[in-house]
Image: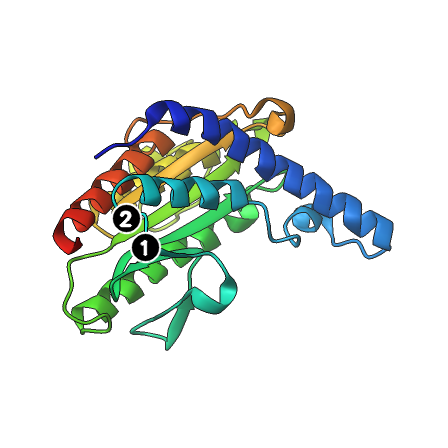
C-alpha cells in the first residue's frame, strides 16, 4: 500500500472548501435566475458539492495499484443491480477487469434543521448496503472477492448539530449511547455500527463548520470513523485487489 498521507492531508481541506463553495455558488446561481428553492435545498440542487471528495478517492485508487481502473463518476455509469429493487445509483463505482472493486456513497447534511434528515439517512444507508450484499450473495456480480463498500457523511459542525437531543420511547428504553446524544454523535454511532455489522467496509463522518469555505477546517468524532481511517482502508483494499488482478 502506498497511500500518500501528505497528499491526502492537503487534499482533504481542499475538498471541504469545494463542498462549501459549491453550495454557495448554487445558491447564488438560483438567486440570479429568480428560481430559489426553500431553505438549504438551494445549496444542494447544484449537484457538485462532493466533487472534491470524488476526485480525492479516484486519486487514491490510481496511486495504490489500479492506475488503469475504470473510476465512474458520471450518472450514466453509476448503477449497480440490487436484490430488493432492480438497481441502485451510487456516487462512485470502481471497476477493473470486469470486477467491482468499490462502490461508495457520498452524503451531506447542513443546518439549521438537523433532525429532519437523520432518520432518513440512517434508513437509506442500512437499506442500500443490505440490498447490495444480498445481491452479491446471490451472484449479481459474478464470482469475485467482496468489494469495498463505503459511506462518507459530511455534516455541518454547528450548535444545532452539537446540541444534546432528547428522544421519546414510551414502551421500551433506547440504547444508552443515544441518550442526550447530539446529531453529530448519532452519526458517529451510526458509522461505527454500520462497520460493526459489516454493512460497510468503512464509514466515515466529517464535521465541518460553514466558515470552512475559506479554511477547509474539518474534524472527526472518533478515530474509527475518521476520513483518514476511511482512505487508509480504501487504499489497502485497492492494493490487495491490484496484487490479485495484475
Q: What residue sits right under mark 1 in the picture?
A: 69
Q: Name the residue rendered at 41%, 52% in the picture.
A: 105
Q: Quadrant of the N terminus?
A: top left
Q: Is residue 172 above or below residue 226?
A: below
Q: What residue sits right under mark 2 in the picture?
A: 66
Residue closest to the eye, 17 or 179: 17
Label of residue 153 in the image = none
The x, y position of residue 9, in whole percent, is 41, 24
Quadrant in the rendering for residue 202: top left
Quadrant in the rendering for residue 100: bottom left
The x, y position of residue 51, in whole percent, is 53, 46
Report the coloring of the rendering: rainbow
- How many other residues sit within 10 Å of disc 2, few (<14), some (14-19) or many (≥20)? many
SS for callout 2: loop
The x, y position of residue 73, in whole percent, is 47, 56
Would residue 135 be visible to someone looking at this image? yes
- How many other residues sit within 10 Å of disc 1, few (<14), some (14-19) or many (≥20)? some
Would residue 164 be visible to someone looking at this image? no
Q: Name the residue rendered at 35%, 61% in the picture.
A: 128
State how far apart marks 2 and 1 are (Cα). 5 Å
Left or right of 57? Residue 129 is left
CB under 8 Å between discs 2 and 1: yes
SS for callout 1: loop
Amino acid at each position: 500500500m502506498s497511500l500518500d498521507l501528505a497528499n491526502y492531508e492537503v487534499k482533504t481541506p481542499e475538498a471541504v472548501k469545494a463542498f462549501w463553495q459549491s453550495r454557495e455558488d448554487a445558491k447564488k446561481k438560483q438567486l440570479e435566475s429568480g428560481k430559489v428553492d426553500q431553505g438549504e435545498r438551494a445549496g444542494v440542487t447544484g449537484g457538485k458539492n462532493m466533487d472534491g471528495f470524488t476526485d480525492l478517492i479516484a486519486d487514491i485508487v490510481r496511486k495504490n495499484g489500479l492506475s488503469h481502473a475504470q473510476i465512474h463518476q458520471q450518472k450514466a455509469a453509476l448503477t449497480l443491480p440490487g436484490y430488493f429493487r432492480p438497481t441502485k445509483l451510487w456516487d462512485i463505482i470502481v471497476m477493473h477487469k470486469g470486477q467491482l472493486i468499490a462502490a461508495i456513497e457520498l452524503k451531506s447534511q447542513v443546518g439549521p434543521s438537523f433532525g429532519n434528515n437523520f432518520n432518513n439517512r440512517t434508513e437509506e444507508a442500512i437499506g442500500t448496503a443490505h440490498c447490495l450484499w444480498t445481491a452479491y450473495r446471490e451472484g449479481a456480480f459474478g464470482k469475485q472477492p467482496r468489494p469495498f463498500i463505503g459511506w462518507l457523511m459530511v455534516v455541518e459542525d454547528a450548535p444545532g448539530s452539537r446540541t444534546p437531543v432528547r428522544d421519546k420511547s414510551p414502551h421500551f428504553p433506547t440504547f444508552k449511547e443515544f441518550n442526550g446524544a447530539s446529531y453529530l454523535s448519532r452519526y458517529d454511532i451510526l458509522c461505527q455500527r454500520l462497520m460493526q455489522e459489516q454493512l460497510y467496509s468503512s464509514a466515515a463522518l466529517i464535521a465541518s463548520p460553514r466558515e470552512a469555505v475559506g479554511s477547509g477546517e474539518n474534524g472527526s468524532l472518533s478515530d474509527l470513523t475518521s476520513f483518514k481511517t476511511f482512505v487508509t482502508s480504501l487504499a489497502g483494499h485497492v492494493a490487495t485487489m491490484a496484487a490479485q488482478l495484475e
